[in-house]
């Protein structure tokens, strides 16, 4: 049976790699829904190639162009943020690949869960902001959430067959990003061109900056807490610059399992889409015969303070991760537009955390209000 995939964020780094996986396995997968925010040209190209049931262009002003380009097909065309939720509620697909970046992914993912559709989750911000609520809904609807993030995919794979065996801790590996070993006197001057150059992974702009500041690893700790129902003390981060071990699980007998491979997001994407089956691939293989040293070291929490802030949010809970995420999104886009410096990103996140009121048990409305208030505040201190 062909699994019909809805790719939310099909024009991004994850989305385009997912389409490569689908194209390599036409007997297993089809692309039924494709969505993009601004890049209507790529969306049109993808639609003509994959012939989905429908497409959504987030930017309303591009609706006419997309409609015209697809006029000779029977592909339905929708536009705007509301349309993302409407198509997530449709019946024409079997699994959502949540590959939108940032808070914008939350609403459509919740709709897909309410619609009973399994989720392949790349959009970590969804769990950072509202993990408790998202996981509760998924359990209530018996909807599996299969991680796409490479570390969480690794942990997920390590847990297969372990049943109720107790996890002592999970060990999230981090490459350390392009500025591993650097100190604040260097970081104060780095520019976006430099920060966007990740040593091991090619990714979208936001996650590349998050990897350079180590905020990405902090967000992933929060993501791991909700995905695997962990206590914050059970989540450890270790720097592993070669990105061969994607993460590890240590069990109550002291045994450690890891999942390894070359850094290539197509692998966890294909695993999530095909789960529980492992599909063949021609991705390059890791070669143990080549001299290669795998190394591990403690993160530098003093220099990369975003990681320390995220751990504070992980421990405090409530709406703090939501504030952290919103402030970080605004700060990252300000850095990408050369409005603030690299170290300022941490300063504005910290200030926003100190100003937005804490809510211990937020409702979904509280999360939207918190997100809005935090964004407004962060933008005001950056004077955007
Ligand atoms: P990207 O910027 O390359 O792509 C983002 C996609 O989301 C695009 O299709 C874009 O059109 C869409 N989008 C952006 N803003 C939107 C909005 N407001 N409304 C609707 N759609 C919107 O990002 P990416 O690197 O593919 O990352 C996507 C998600 O996957 C992120 O949450 C990221 O943290 C996660 N992730 C990415 C990687 C990676 O290797 N790229 C690895 C692990 C996790
Ligand atoms: Mg990751």
Image (spheres, rainbow, N blue to C red):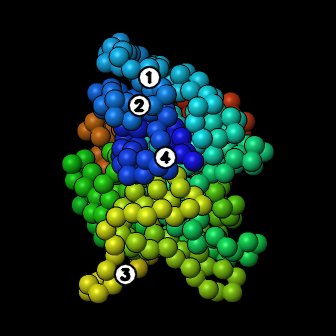
Q: Earlier in the sequence, mark 2 or mark 3?
A: 2
Location of residue 176 by image quarter? bottom left
Q: Which residue is mark 4?
A: 29
Query: In 3D space, how far apart are the residues under numbered discs 1 and 3 (Cα atoms)?
Result: 50 Å
Q: Nearer the viewer, mark 4 or mark 3?
A: 4
Q: Nearer the viewer, mark 2 or mark 3?
A: 2
Vertical placement of residue 94 versus 72, above or below: below
To which residue does mark 3 refer?
A: 295
Determine which residue is flagged by label 2: 51
Q: Earlier in the sequence, mark 1 or mark 4?
A: 4
- Mark 3 residue CB less than 8 A from any atom of ligand 2: no
Q: Is residue 160 above or below residue 325?
A: below
Q: Do labels 1 and 3 touch, CB within 8 Å?
A: no
Write down the residue under mark 1.
Answer: 75
Q: Nearer the viewer, residue 342 or 161?
A: 161
Q: Position of residue 383 (x, y in %)?
A: 37, 29
């Amino acid at each position: 049976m062909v699994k019909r995939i809805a790719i939310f964020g099909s024009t991004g780094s994850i989305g385009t790699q997912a389409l490569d996986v689908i194209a390599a396995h036409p007997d297993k997968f089809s692309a039924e829904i494709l969505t993009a925010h601004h890049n209507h040209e790529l969306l049109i190209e993808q639609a003509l190639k994959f012939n989905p049931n429908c497409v959504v262009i987030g930017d309303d002003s591009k609706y006419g162009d997309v409609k015209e380009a697809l006029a000779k097909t029977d592909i339905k065309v929708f536009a705007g943020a509301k349309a993302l939720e409407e198509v997530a509620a449709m019946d024409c697909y079997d699994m959502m690949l949540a590959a939108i970046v940032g808070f914008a992914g939350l609403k459509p993912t919740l709709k897909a869960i309410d619609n009973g559709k399994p989720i392949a989750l790349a959009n970590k911000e969804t769990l950072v902001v509202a993990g408790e609520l998202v996981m509760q809904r998924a359990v209530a609807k018996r909807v599996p959430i299969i991680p796409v993030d490479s570390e969480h995919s690794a942990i997920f794979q390590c847990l297969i067959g372990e049943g109720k065996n107790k996890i002592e801790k999970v060990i999230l590996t981090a490459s350390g990003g392009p500025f591993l070993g650097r100190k604040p006197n260097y970081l104060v001057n780095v520019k976006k061109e430099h920060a966007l150059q990740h040593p091991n992974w090619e990714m979208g702009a936001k996650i590349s900056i998050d990897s350079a500041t180590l905020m990405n690893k902090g967000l992933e700790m929060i993501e791991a807490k909700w995905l695997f129902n962990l206590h914050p003390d059970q989540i450890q981060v270790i720097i592993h610059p070669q990105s061969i071990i994607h993460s590890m699980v240590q069990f109550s007998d002291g045994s450690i399992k890891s999942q390894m491979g070359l850094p290539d997001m197509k692998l966890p994407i294909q695993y999530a889409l095909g789960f529980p089956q492992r599909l063949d691939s021609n991705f390059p293989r890791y070669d143990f015969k080549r001299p290669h040293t795998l190394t591990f070291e403690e993160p530098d929490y003093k220099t990369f303070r975003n990681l320390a802030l995220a751990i504070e949010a992980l421990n405090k809970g409530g709406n703090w991760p939501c504030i952290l995420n919103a402030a970080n999104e605004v700060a990252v886009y300000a850095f990408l537009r050369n409005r603030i410096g690299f170290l300022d990103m941490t300063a504005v996140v910290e200030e926003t955390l100190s100003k937005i009121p804490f809510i211990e048990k937020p409702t979904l409305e509280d999360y939207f209000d918190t997100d809005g208030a935090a964004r407004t505040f962060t933008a005001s201190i950056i004077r955007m």
